[in-house]
Image: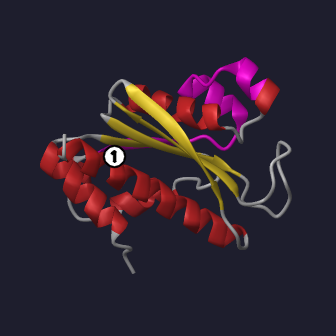
């Protein structure tokens, strides 16, 4: 069953002529797949990068190597840089990223359920920290929904300006 956020994102992006991209670690393509399930997604979804490993984050998304070495991949600035990298790599207007710990074990000193959703829209970018509860599948689903919600919020804010 299609969740309401993806159709809302595709509709808003279509209305505004905004091209979308994703950079995904723990969600491994779920955000892009959810968007692609919506009829009309091909008009606005440019693509995405599944960057499960730090090497891919560094090489394809231009995430700073020193940052990855010092802070690990589960970090707010890593999430922000992933989104900026996806924006550039895909030639998009709005990019969203997700990096975090789905479990079952902690990673990079971060507890299971710690997730950072990054975003880049034009010259602006940022990230938001989340703490989800559940098993691996539930955390990945909550992360996907949070990312789609962030995209919808950015598009809605853009329309009111």
Q: Is residue 9 left or right of residue 79?
A: left
Residue occupying image coordinates x 59% and y 53%: 28
**Vertical position of residue 46 compared to residue 64: above or below:** below
Q: Is residue 76 left or right of residue 68?
A: left
Splitting the image into 4 quarters, where does residue 75 fall? top right
Q: Is residue 146 left or right of residue 38?
A: right
From which residue to which does the magenta span run?
Answer: 45-69
Q: Is residue 123 left or right of residue 26?
A: left
- Residue 48 % position (x, y): 45, 42
Asked whether 106 falls inside the magenta stretch, the response is no
The residue wearing badge 1 is 154
Seen as rendered, the residue at the extreme left is 15
Q: How many marks?
A: 1
**Vertical position of residue 121 compared to residue 154: above or below:** above
Asked whether 50 falls inside the magenta stretch, the response is yes
Image quarter in which the N terminus is found: bottom left
**Vertical position of residue 9 compared to residue 71: above or below:** below
Image quarter in which the C terminus is found: top left
Crowd tier of the residue under label 1, counting other residues whose Cα lies within 10 Å: few below 14, some 14–19, many 20 or above: some
Seen as rendered, the residue at the extreme bottom is 1
Assign a secondary structure to mark 1.
helix
Splitting the image into 4 quarters, where does residue 121 fall? top left
Residue occupying image coordinates x 16% and y 42%: 17
Residue occupying image coordinates x 17% and y 50%: 14
- Residue 130 % position (x, y): 62, 55
- Residue 129 % position (x, y): 61, 48
Seen as rendered, the residue at the extreme front is 161
Residue occupying image coordinates x 82% and y 48%: 107
- Residue 31 % position (x, y): 47, 56
């Amino acid at each position: 069953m299609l969740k309401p956020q993806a159709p809302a994102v595709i509709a808003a992006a279509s209305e505004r002529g905004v091209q979308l991209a994703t950079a995904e670690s723990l969600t491994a393509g779920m955000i892009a797949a959810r968007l692609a399930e919506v009829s009309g997604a091909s008009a606005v979804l440019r693509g995405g990068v599944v960057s499960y490993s730090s090497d891919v984050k560094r090489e394809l998304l231009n995430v700073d190597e020193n940052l990855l070495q010092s802070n690990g991949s589960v970090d707010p600035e890593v999430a922000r840089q992933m989104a900026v990298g996806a924006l550039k790599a895909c030639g998009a207007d709005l990019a969203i990223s997700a990096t975090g710990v789905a479990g079952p074990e902690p990673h990079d000193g971060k507890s299971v359920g710690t997730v950072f959703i990054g975003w880049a829209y034009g010259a602006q970018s940022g990230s938001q920290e989340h703490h989800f509860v559940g098993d691996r599948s539930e955390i990945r689903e909550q992360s996907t929904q949070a990312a789609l919600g962030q995209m919808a919020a950015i598009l809605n804010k853009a329309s009111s300006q």
